[in-house]
Amino acid sequence: MMKLDVAEGVFPLGESRTFSFVIAPESLDLGDDTGHLRGEICVDGTVMNTGSSMRVAGTVRTCRSFVCDRCLAEGEREITLDFSEDYAKTPGETDEAAVCDGETIILDDLVRDTLLVAEPLRELCKSDCKGLCPICGQNLNEGSCSCDTFVPDPRLAALESLLKND
Ligand SMILES: [Zn+2]
Ligand SMILES: [Zn+2]
């Protein structure tokens, strides 16, 4: 568990402190999403006593495996995600506000949410991935095939016939 000691007596107003944790994906209870996180999760950041709240900000770094949405190639990618949260010292008007009990802040939920929210709907092995040939399935990043995948643009065809009539 990633725990910050923020007891008032030892954490003066205006002071900020750095923290650093290295945890295993399994320890975060990410459900099915742990499967494609590779290796450790590194969490670094600062916590600051702003008076009304404890302000936590930092980054999560880990490695994630994925399958390319276009060519189905498997890859691994390092990801760095920012997070920040104000832990109010007294409960605010909204239920959502994170509340600090005045002694400790547990970062696990914040880190878990940061990882889950960042989950992309689709991911490409590279931004210009050519994908697979819809006819023969050839991975077009590795070489072209001999299929005729040319689809004529109807507007262009109309223009061509106009030019011919001229
Ligand atoms: Zn790809
Ligand atoms: Zn083909």
Image (spheres, grey):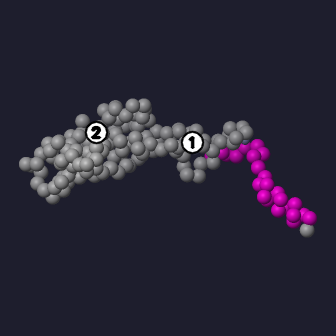
Helix, strand, or loop for circle 2?
helix
- Label 1: how many Cα within 10 Å (few below 14, some 14–19, many 20+): some
Please determine whether, in this image, residue 62 is positioned above or below residue 51.
above
Q: Where is residue 164 in the image (x, y as percent from the top left)?
A: 90, 64
Seen at 23% across and 49% down, the residue is 92
Q: Quadrant of ligand 1?
A: top right
Left or right: 56, with 115 as reference point: left
Q: Residue at x 83, y 59 (%)?
A: 158
Pointer 2 residue: 108
Q: In this view, does 143 lie to the left or right of 82?
A: right
Q: Name the residue: 18% across, 47% down.
A: 90
State which region is magenta.
140-165
Closer to the eye: label 1 or 2: 2
Q: What residue type is labelled 2?
A: Asp
Tell me the CA gap for discs 1 and 2. 30 Å
Q: Is residue 143 magenta?
A: yes
Q: Which mark is residue 166?
A: none
Q: Within the magenta stretch, is there residue 77?
A: no
Q: Earlier in the sequence, mark 1 or mark 2?
A: 1
Question: For mark 2, does the 10 Å Cα neighbourhood hold few (<14), some (14 to 19), or many (20 or more) residues?
Answer: some
Residue 105 shown left or right of residue 131 in the figure: left
Mark 1 lies within 8 Å of ligand 1 (Cβ measured): yes
- The reply to whether residue 81 is in sight is yes
User: Residue 116 at x, y = what percent?
Assistant: 40, 41
The x and y percentages for residue 101 are 17, 42
From the image, tell me which residue sits under label 1: 69
Outermost residue, front direction? 93
